[in-house]
Image (cartoon, grey):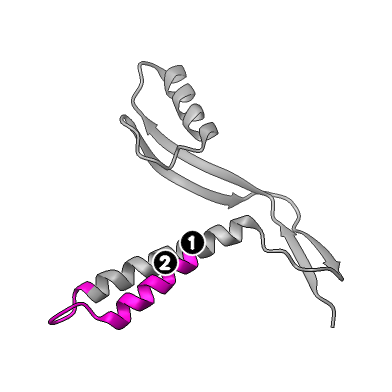
Amino acid sequence: MEHCTVEIRVPHDHVVVMGVEADDADSARKRALDLFDAGDHQEPHPGVVLLRDDFEESDGHLYATVRCGYDLQVDASVRALESEMHRRRACALLVQAAHGKDAPDPTLIRAAIEAALAAA
């Protein structure tokens, strides 16, 4: 059996819509583009509201590339998603443990610590 990766590329548009308080349309456009280019458009900013941040498939073909016979490498984007999942699980377990009847549940606290360590 060979180890293979299949890379699928779907043409898409990244659609971001922001509500921006500004003196005029050019100022609003510049502020929105500056936030987007800096990667800060998802963070809260005075006078700016993120209304939509989504991907839509655009017209085009689906591309698939297959490569076999080498070690599989996990991309940083996947590690970031896994880390986020572990952080959310740790938070949920801590909240659940804190709402125990008499005292915090040590089993849940241990599970939360393990999830937090996995996120690190």
Q: Magenta segment, which residues?
A: 98-120
Labelled pair 1, 2 in contact (Cβ < 8 Å):
yes
Q: Using the image, tell me which numbered label, if any, was put on residue 70.
A: none
Q: In screen coordinates, is 81 left or right of 112?
A: right
User: Is the magenta region chiefly helix, strand or loop?
Assistant: helix
The three-letter amino acid code for the residue at tag 1 is Ala
Q: Residue at x 51, y 28 (%)?
A: 33
Task: Compare residues 57 and 8 and report the one nearer the observer.
Answer: 8
Q: Secondary structure at mark 1?
A: loop
The x, y position of residue 103, in whole percent, is 16, 79
Examine the structure image and report whether residue 105 is included in the region drawn in magenta.
yes
Residue at x 47% of width, y 24% of height: 29
| Quarter of the image where one finds residue 1 | bottom right
Can you give x and y, in whole percent of width and height, for residue 72 in the image? 75, 68
Instruction: Judge whether 20 appears above or below 44 on screen.
Output: above
Residue annotated with mark 1: 120
Q: Callout 2 environment at 10 Å: few (<14), some (14 to 19), or many (20+)?
A: some
